[in-house]
Image: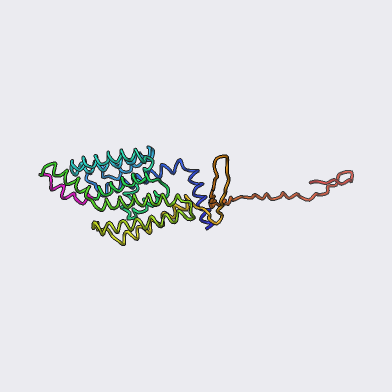
Amino acid sequence: MTSLLVAKQYIKKIYGKYEVYLVPLLKFLISFICFLLVNANLGYMNKINNIAIVLVLALMCSFMPSNFVIIVAAALVVAHLYALSLECAIVALAIFLLMFLLYFRFSPKDMLVVVLTPICFWLKIPYVIPISMGLIGTPTSAVSTACGVIVYYLIAYIRQSATTLVSMETEEVTAKFRYLIDGILNNKGMIVTLVAFTATIILVYLLRRLSMDHSWTIAIIAGALVNVMILLVGDLMFDTNVSIAGIIIGTIVSAIIAVVIQFFEFNVDYSRTEKVQFEDDEYYYYVKAVPKVTVATPERKVKQINSQKRTRPSQGVRTVDGRSSTKK
């Protein structure tokens, strides 16, 4: 355990020292992965389905404000959908504009959540998002998480319906709009996921703020169980065709990642808990103080040992007059 704490201190020290370089690098990696996944799942416009374009856009996003990544990703999605169907592009643009209004109104600092939620869906570990945001976020983080969920299901639905949409070119425009809107609004899997993620975020947030011992650990376990329960009940009620094994394994992996987040954000020693009571002219105060677990990072000291200079023994030199003198 001590070695882990030392490693934690080293990581924080390195991040604090090189933050000016690590933050742009992190934004570059997230942007690059996000744009690659958009091209891989859509890819209808050949001009932007290019690794060079992705690299340039990701490099540009690394030096821009964080929210710029969301705007570029939305523009890529709309461009691909425009190459597929004008109606798809219009519907997607309207959804993005509505999400931007909600996102910038309630949780403008949760850029990573909007981008990472679809990425975690494609990595088969989406349940780490609601548990993690319940630990380090606020209930308004449910808005950003919901935006990410909607984006993922929007892309997945259009990708599955691409053949049908292309075959509907000869039909009326209103029929295509109705097909798209009904398919998105009636997506029961998306609705169940939104309910499960929102409930998980709120529950984890409320539990981890309690003053009881091991509140974060209890919040992680309770959030994972509630998430699994809602998804399974939703599958029984609405036949969402989810993988039960995938839900269980994904939730276990997500809980492990949440424990790692807890180690870096809230690592305390409950065995040294102190309860303090004091008062002033108007109130009595009952304070519970739980110390953080910290360890000093060992500092390496290099000790330089200088070799002593050897002095040559004095040699006697006889002078002309017969008296002796020393010569060093």
Can the viewer see residue 227 in this picture?
yes
Can the viewer see residue 158 in this picture?
no
Q: Nearer the viewer, residue 62 or 284?
A: 284
Q: Nearer the viewer, residue 151 or 292?
A: 292
**Residue in the image at 53% along x and 56% along y:** 3
**How many numbered marks are there?**
0
Q: How is the image coloured?
A: rainbow
Question: Which residue lies most toward the left here?
Answer: 170
**Residue in the image at 31% along x and 51% along y:** 195
Q: Main secondary structure of the magenta part?
A: helix
**Residue in the image at 48% along x and 45% along y:** 15
User: Residue 79, how many percent across, how many down?
Assistant: 24, 41
Is residue 278 found inside the magenta-colored segment of the image?
A: no
Is residue 162 found inside the magenta-colored segment of the image?
A: yes
Question: Which residue lies most toward the bottom here?
Answer: 245
Horizontal side of 11 relative to 97 (left or right) equals right
User: Residue 209, how many percent across, how many down?
Assistant: 45, 49
Question: Which residue lies most toward the front here?
Answer: 282
Magenta region: 157-170
Horizontal side of 210 relative to 79 (left or right) equals right
Instruction: Classify residue 217 by image quadrant.
Output: bottom left
Horizontal side of 82 relative to 320 (left or right) equals left
User: Residue 245, how many percent across, how many down?
Assistant: 31, 62
Horizontal side of 70 relative to 293 (left or right) equals left
151 to 228, vertically: above or below: above
Q: Nearer the viewer, residue 274 or 190?
A: 274
